[in-house]
Amino acid sequence: MTQLKRFPEEVCQKIGNYVYRLIDPRNGETFYVGKGKNNRVFDHAAGIPEVAEDSDQTLGGKLDRIRAIKNAGLSVLHVIHRHEIPDVAVFEVEAAIIDAYPGLTNIQGGHASSDRGPMNHMELVDKYALPDFPADPRHALVLININKLDDRSDRKAI
């Protein structure tokens, strides 16, 4: 079976937005998750950056990994996870898959991952079961962010 290097035009028109993973054939490790249309997955797997979209980012880790794979005489593997994704949902699908694969070379995390990404049940309760903050508090307040503390449940550490 010959390896497909591009989608035919009729396939591009039918699959619309999709989310894909790039995989290192040397160890089976997923190293990048992206979203695309048309032949973007093939361009990324070949190490061809789309200058217009990636010009403000350093391609570093992803491109280095692709070069190392090619230097080993191999080709980057890829999987299309979902296709025909509506424009309003493509960022959410991409973010969910990025969240599922730690250690990626992606420069950006998934869309809204820090806000709606992986959480355990207690984090969800803490986030959504807190009482409403008064619009006009009676006293002057100071907000202190404790996100950097290792154990935010330790009152002494806080």
Image (tube, rainbow, N blue to C red):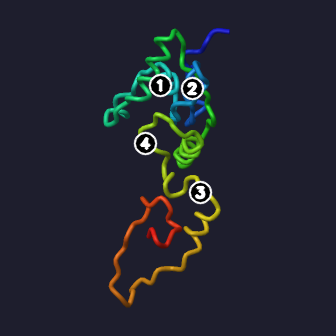
Q: Position of residue 17 (x, y in %)?
A: 55, 37
Q: How far apart are marks 4 and 3 (CA)?
A: 19 Å
Q: Which amino acid does label 2 sit on?
A: Ile
Q: Name the residue under label 1.
A: 44
Q: How far apart are marks 2 and 3 (CA)?
A: 26 Å
Q: Mark 3 points at which residue?
A: 119
For marks 4 and 3, the one nearer the N-term is 4
Q: What residue type is labelled 3?
A: Met
Q: Dividing the picture into quarters, in which one does residue 9 lie?
A: top right
Check the image and report above or below for 149 versus 18: below
Q: Decide: few, some or many residues near mark 4? Use Cα within 10 Å; few <14, some 14-19, many ≥20.
A: few
In this view, the residue in front, 98 or 71, is 71
Q: Nearer the viewer, mark 2 or mark 1?
A: 2
| Image point (45%, 84%), residue name | 134
Q: Nearer the viewer, mark 3 or mark 1?
A: 3
Q: In this view, does 109 lie to the left or right of 60?
A: right
Q: Position of residue 57 (x, y in %)?
A: 34, 35
Q: Which amino acid does label 1 sit on?
A: His
> Would you say the residues marked 4 and 2 are in contact, meaning their CB atoms lie under 8 Å apart?
no
Query: Which disc is residue 1 wearing?
Result: none
For marks 2 and 3, the one nearer the N-term is 2
Check the image and report above or below for 14 versus 85: above
Q: Nearer the viewer, mark 4 or mark 3?
A: 3
Q: What element carries label 2?
A: strand
Q: Mark 4 points at which residue?
A: 108
| Image point (41%, 21%), residue name | 48
For marks 4 and 1, the one nearer the N-term is 1
Q: Is mark 1 on a helix, strand or loop?
A: helix
Q: Distance between the residues labelled 4 and 2?
A: 18 Å
